Image: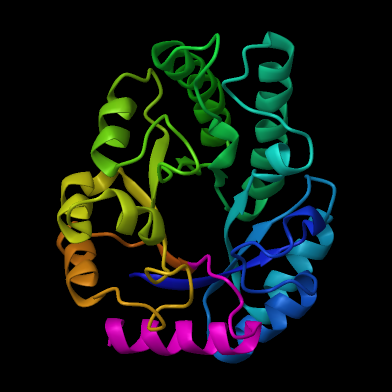
Amino acid sequence: MIQSAITVSLVEEARGGPFVYWNGLEDAFDRAAKLGFDAVEIFAPGPDAVSQAELKSLTERTGLKVAAVGTGAGMVKHGLSLTDVDASKRKAARDFVRSMIDFGGPVGAPAIIGSMQGRWGGDLSLDGALDYLAEALDELGPHAATYNVPLIYEPLNRYETNLIRTVDEGVKFLKRLKTDNIKLLADLFHMNIEEANVADALRQGGDAIGHIHFVDSNRQAAGLGHTDFAPIIEALRSIGYDGYLCAEAFPLPDSDTAAQKTIEAFKSLLA
């Protein structure tokens, strides 16, 4: 069954970014639970930002789950990339992702690799960058499997990466990996830029799709842009998708309105 989720950022350096809630984890869990969401996706500065005891207490008190945890703070705060030409920095990036897998794993939440995938250019070729990325995923995917969760990899739009930008490119990349514990994050905002047809791309992605960022064409809450969500939901049902639709959206016009619009759209589309 497809479930709803909403994002919260605990990373001050990312303020102004596309996360709905910004006022702490307890506030996010309480507001999301009141609106009827199923889970919260957490963008944290690191694995020590929230204790496992606090996380467990919040999930038990509200009945919400943790949909996923982001790793982008490794880039935002520390400038780390899995495709850095410096081997020591690549190792630091892998170590950071590993620590976030260890943060989310105990509560059943997979880690997401988005901005930490980096870019190619200068002394680094595309093939070289993809080799570094494959090396990282082949190391980290099996580690995520120890918690019985996948590692989530996110194709990004052309303005954020020059590595893998479409679902089809993502599926082809997964086939070269040794690990089978990597799933794709299909972000509807990025797909609106890169895909000729979002619904068709999701169908072609099939069981490689492991997480959805549920957001409109303008990165606002669903219903505040021009995306036609009906064929997207139909495509997800056709591939048997049973993960989360998670709002990684700007808090516009404010957090509460963005959250309310998201849950209204989710309930209407999934009715």
Q: Residue at x 65, y 44 (%)?
A: 72
Residue 182 on the magenta segment: no
Image x and y of residue 178, in percent: 38, 17
Q: Main secondary structure of the magenta part?
A: helix
Q: Quadrant of residue 101?
A: top right
The image's colour scheme reads rainbow
Q: Is residue 59 above or below residue 42?
A: below
Q: Is residue 10 above or below residue 209?
A: below
**Nearer to us in this view, 16 or 109:** 16
Q: Residue at x 38, y 43 (%)?
A: 184
Would residue 209 be found to the left or right of residue 236 on screen?
right
Q: Is residue 147 visible?
A: no
**Nearer to us in this view, 219 or 111:** 219
Q: Is residue 161 above or below residue 90?
A: below
Q: Is residue 77 visible?
A: yes
Q: Quadrant of the N terminus?
A: bottom left
Image x and y of residue 271, in percent: 27, 88
Q: State the extent of the magenta-drawn residues as a range.
A: 247-271
Q: Residue at x 37, y 33 (%)?
A: 164
Q: Residue at x 50, y 29 (%)?
A: 141
Image x and y of residue 120, in percent: 49, 21
